Amino acid sequence: MAPFLIGIDNGGTVTKAAVYTVDGRELAVSSRKTVMIMPQPGHTERDMEELWKANVSVIKEVLAKSGIDPKEVAGVAVTGHGNGLYLVDAAGKPVGNGIVSTDTRAKHLVEQWYQDGTAERVLPKTMQSIWAGQPVALLGWLQANRREALEKARWVLMCKDFIRYRLTGEAYAEVTDISGTNLFNIKDVSYDDELLAEFGLQGIAEKLPPVKYSADICGYVTEQAAKETGLAVGTPVAGGLFDIDASAIASGVTDEDKLCVVAGTWSINEYITKEPVVDKALFMTSIYCIPGYWLTLEGSPTSASNLEWFTNEFFSQEHDAALKQGISVYELCNQMVASTKPEDSHIVFFPFLFGSNVDANAKACFIGLNGWHTKAHMVRALYEGVVFGHRQHIDKLLVHRSRPKAVRLAGGATRSEEWMQMFADVLQLPVEVVEGTEQGTLGASICAGVATKHFDSFSQAAESMVKVSKTYTPQEQHRDIYEQKYQAYLEVLEALQPLWKKLS
């Protein structure tokens, strides 16, 4: 029987599944969008039953597309967006909507924890910043505003843990995901009653599931799940992993030399190390899927999703024009960027539509527009602003490590050659793009392969399944102009710092 692996990836708005061979060949991919529910400003939610149905649909579709026998699936693993909050009751039913990690309703709690010293006290245990989309803040908000929901909940789950629970009927947390939530003492790799008490969350300890590792088998596909998805009853389901880990392992990050960048909904910039980095100026250190390694990350929701919003809101004519040409509106955007040069315009764009990496109240904006500017200049500025946001994060990481020889880049932006070349030119580093269309599902499949013993380790699995498809070399002639534009970006950002609160 030929072994096949299925990886499932649940992002903030899109659910995907893919089938792979153990040598990394992608046989079929399927995706479904889920509706983002925004009942109030700052609230970003999703219907958990709709989310499960999306997973059912993509699994059924990849099985059909690939033409494989479900009995030939050696294992399944799920990845998903980290943080947010997915509560289920004792019967496994959702308690309200799931909350996505872009939610900001609890930002006042985060401000309070920074002001009263809580953040500084917990840092040696959690090794990460606190932010509004984390379950620690959302649980605090529920405790103060919707206590009945919290009391009804039996399990506190992350996004991918909820899907695994529906596949297997067994509730577990998983170490890479839970270590990024501020609910977990990652120094001692355990839950910690004193840590929970610092946040006033003593009462939720019994609602936190047992913790498993990424490559642990965490159950088997139940009869009900098999009936819904088309998977075979008894198919092993691995612990899975936080999407930042999935992207890193799918980029071949198995040692300390490589730097991984993900340009998708979030700006993710990360590397692994055998010694944890604890610095209040950094966004997060968490536990990596390879035992013995820590993942050091700088990130914010400031990446390619800005382009999706911009085109949805302002490019109705361009959508129609792209359709007539038989291309996507994003390909049209690439053409617009290619029609301009870096020195043509000095518009500054801050990619803060869904949050920022500088201030909780910072807002997205274009600065420096003139009447002669076109949409092409604005799209170029948006591309540049996203890359500059990534560079800010990378500069902070480089305080703690040597400059890498190359950057492995993943995420939706990799479909744009113009954007990839811009990353190489701004960073003045070679940018390597990995083969395949979906890093999240590939990372999850690697995890499934290790869990089912088709590989002895994540390193062996990555060596077999990860292949670089293209490398973008920095263009020396663009070095100075991008450096000037980046410094202007930072200077304008600093000048606006006193105004963000007034605009909130």
Image (cartoon, rainbow, N blue to C red):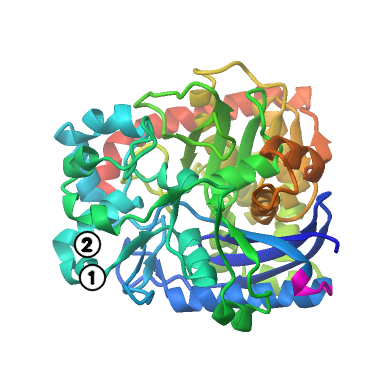
Judge whether 192 appears above or below 66 on screen.
above
Question: Residues at badges 2 and 1 in contact (C-beta under 8 Å)?
Answer: yes
- Residue carrying label 1: 149
Q: Amino acid at mark 1?
A: Ala
Camera-side residue of 215 and 341: 215
Q: Amino acid at mark 2?
A: Leu
Q: Residue at x 49, y 21 (%)?
A: 275
Camera-side residue of 253 and 237: 237
Which of discs 2 and 1 lies nearer the camera? The answer is 1
- Residue carrying label 2: 142
Sequence-first tag of 2 and 1: 2
Q: Residue at x 50, y 73 (%)?
A: 51
Q: Residue at x 42, y 39 (%)?
A: 357
Residues shaded magenta: 67-71
Mark 1 burial class by Cα count in 10 Å: few <14, some 14-19, many 20+: some
Using the numbered discs, state the Cα–Cα distance from disc 2 to disc 1 in whole angstroms: 7 Å
Q: Name the quadrant containing residue 206.
A: bottom left
Judge whether 141 appears above or below 380 on screen.
below
- SS of the residue at dot 1? helix
Q: Is residue 72 left or right of residue 100?
A: right
- In percent of width and height, residue 235 lies at 65, 67
